[in-house]
């Protein structure tokens, strides 16, 4: 017969210590999981950039409109550079439809689109500029 | 001011989703597809295809032209690949309409010869510039055909692919460049809603 079969006087206290230790571990794991659940999506959400077409933008070659958005310009071609998870807000305060990178915004409308996927997105640009949205890890 | 959101906020749809969707259900366009190649759809009293899906189905709408060197064939190829990624019973519930923005050159015969390279069944929609205008406006699409002095034809057009439900609402807009995988993922979600 093994010694384990003989109860000792301190077995009860040891069990309580083990239970407390286990409880602390469980609490710690739950706390870490909760923190990850709260913070994780925020970290993964990416940045949000806003592009505003003010009244009278129609036909303008106003590349300065793109200043709030990470981009590079080569001649009349604008490359908006985003990372997966970044969002682009297109705010149209003008009286005509505007479009950037395949996002269409009616007059007075604000469109928010999250680019989850890597790739190059394009469309006719209403500013007489060629605009691509390039989504890639930097 | 309507605020629109795409991506995670809408069941993980990858295309652009508006809280105030485009309403295109009142638009109808002449369908020049030969009967043997014609997909299912909702017709108006004049036999034109209405811009709304049949019940339990989706109608995908693309504006383009047959001489397009890049955007249009790429869109159709990505769409073809997306449909092939779906189970057959889901793919069978998707109807595709190709609206030509270059009707002078895109004759019914030319459309019928070209589109089967991408789709087994489809709607080839063709009308003149005046007839096309209400459709362009409803979808916020643009198209411009110019003929140079030397006779060269240049066509500029927007390249968004639209998904329309049975109520005539555009439920998703996919910017040009959206992958076939993302299209297929969105189609599964949308078809799941419309069962």
Image (spheres, coloured by chain):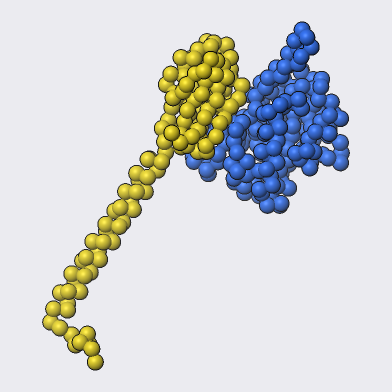
Chain colours: A yellow, B blue
Specify the quadrant of the image occupied by residue B150.
top right
Q: Position of residue A8 (x, y in %)?
A: 15, 83
Horizontal side of residue A14 vs B86, given as left or right: left
Q: In this view, does B124 lie above or below B88?
A: above
Residue lying farthest to the left in this orientation: A9
Specify the quadrant of the image occupied by residue B14.
top right
- Residues A38 and B156: in front is B156
Q: Is residue A33 above or below residue B68?
A: below
| Image point (75%, 10%), residue name | B148
Horizontal side of residue B139 vs A77, given as left or right: right
Decide if residue B82 is in sight here. yes
Decide if residue A105 is in sight here. no
Q: Position of residue A12 (x, y in %)?
A: 17, 77
Horizontal side of residue B141 vs A55, given as left or right: right
| Image point (41%, 32%), residue name | A47
Q: Where is residue A96 in the image (x, y as percent from the top left)?
A: 58, 16
- Residues A138 and A125: in front is A138
Horizontal side of residue B191 vs A11, given as left or right: right
Q: Where is residue B65 in the image (x, y as percent from the top left)?
A: 74, 26
- Residues A112 and A4: in front is A4
Q: Count the labels in the image.
A: 0
Residue lying farthest to the bottom in this orientation: A1
| Image point (66%, 38%), residue name | B78
Residue lying farthest to the top in this orientation: B149
- Residues B182 and B49: in front is B182
| Image point (53%, 28%), residue name | A133
């Amino acid at each position: 017969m093994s010694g384990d079969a003989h109860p000792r006087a301190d077995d009860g206290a040891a069990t309580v210590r083990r239970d407390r230790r286990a409880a602390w571990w469980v609490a710690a794991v739950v706390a870490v999981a909760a923190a990850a659940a709260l913070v994780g999506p925020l970290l993964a959400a990416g940045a949000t950039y806003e592009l505003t077409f003010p009244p009278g933008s129609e036909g303008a070659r106003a590349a300065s409109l793109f200043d709030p958005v990470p981009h590079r310009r080569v001649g009349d071609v604008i490359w908006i550079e985003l990372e997966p998870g970044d969002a682009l807000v297109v705010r149209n305060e003008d009286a005509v439809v505007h479009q950037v990178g395949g996002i269409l915004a009616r007059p007075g409308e604000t469109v928010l689109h999250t680019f989850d996927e890597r790739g190059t997105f394009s469309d006719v640009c209403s500013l007489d500029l060629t605009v691509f949205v390039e989504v890639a890890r930097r | 001011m309507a605020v629109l959101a795409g991506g995670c906020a809408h069941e993980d749809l990858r295309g652009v989703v508006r809280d105030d969707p485009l309403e295109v259900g009142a638009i109808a366009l002449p369908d020049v597809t030969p009967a043997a190649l014609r997909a299912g759809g909702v017709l108006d009293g004049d036999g034109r295809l209405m811009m709304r899906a049949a019940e339990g189905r989706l109608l995908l709408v693309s504006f383009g032209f047959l001489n397009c060197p890049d955007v249009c064939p790429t869109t159709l190829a990505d769409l073809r690949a997306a449909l092939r990624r779906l189970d057959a019973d889901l793919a069978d519930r998707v109807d595709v309409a190709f609206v030509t923005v270059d009707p002078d050159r895109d004759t019914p015969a030319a459309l019928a010869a070209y589109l089967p390279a991408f789709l087994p069944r489809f709607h080839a929609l063709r009308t003149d510039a005046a007839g096309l205008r209400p459709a362009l406006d409803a979808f916020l699409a643009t198209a411009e055909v110019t003929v140079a002095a030397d006779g060269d034809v240049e066509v500029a057009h927007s390249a968004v692919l639209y998904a329309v439900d049975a109520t005539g609402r555009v439920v998703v807009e996919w910017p040009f460049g959206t992958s076939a995988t993302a299209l297929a993922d969105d189609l599964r979600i949308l078809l799941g809603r419309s069962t």
